[in-house]
Amino acid sequence: MQTLTVDFIMSLDGYGAAEGWPGWWGLEGPDYLGWLEELPEQDHPILMGATTYRLMSELTASGEEGTDVLNGVQKYVFSSTLDEPLTWENSTLVREDAVEFVRRLKEESDLPLRTLGSVALCRSLLRAGLVDRYRVVVFPVITGATGQDRIFDGYPDVRLDLVEARTFDRRSQLLEYVPTVLEGPPGA
């Protein structure tokens, strides 16, 4: 069975985006972009929801630095609002239940799976016990006034065991964890 890694980028206060800020809050830097280009899982299939698909396909089409590597990757897009054909190459529209589809895909895929953004999708996959790793890059900004898409709202309690940490460009932090969904606070 293949693994599933959830990938998020976020501000220090837990937002996935912020109104008026550029992608990566304008702090992507050469070290971070180099890491993205060298990831061994660059060719691993990506799972995403409709909102992330719309955003990322537009960024890629506009030539946003660092997004072109996603063109050749198989993308599974979970949506009841998008129409076929999807315009971003190598994108497959999935209308069936995401949990069941991903459970089956983990068994059948030749490669490990990963997500891109897609807060609600990732939350449902975690609750279903399908997430093997959480990889978060924390950018050194607080977007309390303009932040959008609070990443962990609505999540269950989760214990995270750190398996990797790294600093990019002397400012952004990569934190990779193995998650364990808890029934309640430890010791309760």
Image (cartoon, grey):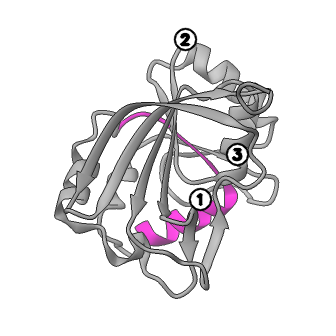
Instruction: Name the amino acid type tagged 1.
Output: Tyr
Q: Mark 3 points at which residue?
A: 121
Instruction: Name the amino acid type tagged 2.
Output: Met
Instruction: Name the amino acid type tagged 3.
Output: Leu
Q: Is residue 81 left or right of residue 117?
A: right
Q: Which of marks 3 and 2 is nearer the N terminus?
A: 2
Q: Which residue lies furthest to the front in this view?
A: 187
Does residue 57 belong to the magenta stretch?
yes
Whole-percent x, y for residue 52 in the image: 60, 60
Q: Main secondary structure of the magenta part?
A: helix
Q: Do the residues labelled 2 and 1 touch (CB within 8 Å)?
A: no
Crowd around label 2: few <14 · some 14–19 · many ≥20 (10 Å): few
Q: Residue 114, relative to residue 35: is it above or below? A: above
Could you give the CA–CA distance between mark 2 and mark 1, rounded to whole angstroms? 26 Å
Crowd around label 1: few <14 · some 14–19 · many ≥20 (10 Å): many
Does residue 165 belong to the magenta stretch?
no
Whole-percent x, y for residue 24 in the image: 40, 69
* Residue lying at 67% horizontally and 52% vertically, measured from the top left: 152
Q: Name the residue under label 2.
A: 1
> Looking at this view, is 91 or 167 the one in front?
167
Secondary structure beneath dot 2 equals: loop
Q: Which of marks 2 and 1 is nearer the N terminus?
A: 2
User: In the rendered structure, which segment of residues is drawn in magenta?
Assistant: 43-60
Asked where in the image residue 159 lies, by quadrant, the reply is top right
Whole-percent x, y for residue 18 in the image: 56, 78
Could you give the CA–CA distance between mark 3 and mark 2, rounded to whole angstroms? 20 Å
Secondary structure beneath dot 3 equals: helix
Q: Residue 106, relative to residue 73: is it above or below? A: above
Q: In this view, does 124 lie to the left or right of 110?
A: right
* Residue lying at 69% horizontally and 28% vertically, measured from the top left: 181
Could you give the CA–CA distance between mark 3 and mark 1, rounded to whole angstroms? 12 Å
* Residue lying at 74% horizontally and 59% vertically, measured from the top left: 82
